[in-house]
């Protein structure tokens, strides 16, 4: 009799029958490294596969990820990190400017906290997008309340969508910087439309009302996000 290292039950086999934990863990070697890199880049279920699937059928794929099969797509937190990183790297190489969340707060006070907050939002498109998703998730929960998804499931859905939006912005930004045509600001509508389409698809693509609720949820979500940023900034400025 052995004791499982993870759940402490008594076991006789190589794998624990209670929690599935293997009794012998293989040493980390070159094969481990290549298999880990391979699993991220895997064309069957890695990052490229995930991007392709989210481009063609975003709503259905994320729904299946949440309720049926977690191995279909790259893990959402990992995905959003890769997408933000990609955006940041290419934004610096190709020097395109974030036109989606671009704010200039006029203020005579040079160390106004409100000005700093909005400057941060403008300069950190990736993080701002993730933060904004939290507020959009709240409004989606309200507007699509008869669907059985909890807040965290909606948030996971939005992380996948935001990641794709960042990749689209990266692609449009590179095109803009190469052609000198302002593709990025025009592409804003495509990037937004993608999110609305994905949301309607995620809940029920046959319901026309779902296509109307999506833009309203995103609009109210971003308004809530900016209002909270504004109020926090104003309050801190007042206290100072
Ligand atoms: Zn166990």
Image (cartoon, rainbow, N blue to C red):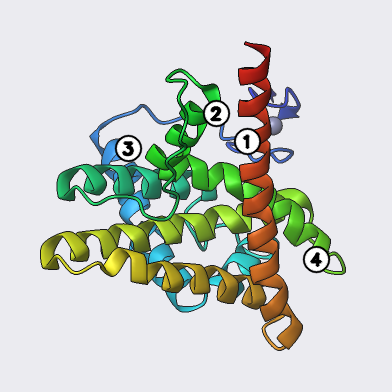
Disc 2 + disc 1, Cβ < 8 Å: yes
Q: Where does label 4 land, which residue?
A: 143
Q: Say if mark 4 contacts mark 3, CB within 8 Å.
A: no
Question: Residue drawn 53% across and 22% down?
Answer: 113
Residue 78's tag is: none
Q: Can residue 3 be seen in this view?
A: no
Mark 3 / mark 1, whichever is N-terminal = 3
Residue 114 disc label: 2
Q: Which residue is drawn at 64% across and 61% down?
A: 219
Q: Which mark is residue 32?
A: 3
Task: Estimate the spatial distance between the alpha carbons at disc 3 and disc 2, rounded to whole Å.
Answer: 48 Å
Helix, strand or loop status at disc 3: helix
Q: The residue tagged with tag 4: helix, strand or loop?
A: helix
Question: At x 69% / y 47%, what residue is drawn?
Answer: 224
Q: In this rendering, which labeled residue sits more in front, label 1 or label 4?
A: 1
* Sequence-earlier tag: 3 or 2: 3
Q: Which of marks 3 and 2 is in front?
A: 2
Marked residue nearer the N-terminal end (2 or 4) = 2
Report how far apart the C-alphas of labels 2 and 1 lie in the structure: 6 Å
Query: In the drawing, does residue 73 fall left or right of residue 136?
Result: left
The residues bearing labels 3 and 1 have C-alpha atoms spaced at a distance of 48 Å
Q: Nearer the viewer, mark 2 or mark 4?
A: 2
The quadrant of the picture occupied by the C terminus is top right
Is 107 located above or below residue 141 in the figure?
above
**N-term mark: 4 or 3:** 3
Res 230 label:
1
Mark nearer the viewer, 4 or 3: 4
CA gap, disc 2 and disc 4: 30 Å
């Amino acid at each position: 009799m052995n004791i499982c290292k993870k759940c402490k039950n008594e076991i006789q086999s190589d794998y624990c029958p209670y929690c599935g934990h293997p009794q012998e863990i293989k040493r980390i070697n070159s094969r481990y490294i290549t298999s880990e890199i391979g699993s991220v880049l895997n064309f069957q279920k890695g990052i490229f596969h995930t991007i392709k699937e989210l481009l063609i059928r975003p709503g259905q794929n994320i729904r299946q990820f949440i309720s049926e099969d977690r191995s279909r797509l790259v893990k959402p937190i990992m995905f959003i990190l890769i997408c933000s990183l990609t955006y940041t790297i290419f934004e610096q190489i190709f020097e395109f400017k974030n036109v989606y969340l671009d704010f200039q707060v006029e203020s005579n006070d040079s160390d106004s906290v409100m000005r700093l907050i909005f400057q941060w939002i403008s300069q950190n498109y990736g993080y701002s997008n993730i933060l904004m998703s939290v507020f959009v998730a709240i409004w989606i929960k309200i507007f699509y309340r008869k669907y059985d998804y909890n807040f965290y499931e909606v948030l996971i859905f939005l992380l996948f969508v935001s990641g794709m939006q960042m990749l689209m912005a990266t692609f449009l930004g590179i095109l803009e910087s190469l052609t000198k045509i302002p593709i990025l600001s025009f592409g804003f509508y495509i990037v937004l439309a993608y999110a609305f389409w994905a949301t309607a698809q995620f809940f029920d693509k046959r319901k026309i009302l779902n296509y109307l609720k999506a833009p309203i949820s995103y609009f109210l979500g971003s308004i809530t996000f900016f209002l909270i940023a504004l109020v926090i900034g104003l309050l801190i400025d007042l206290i100072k």
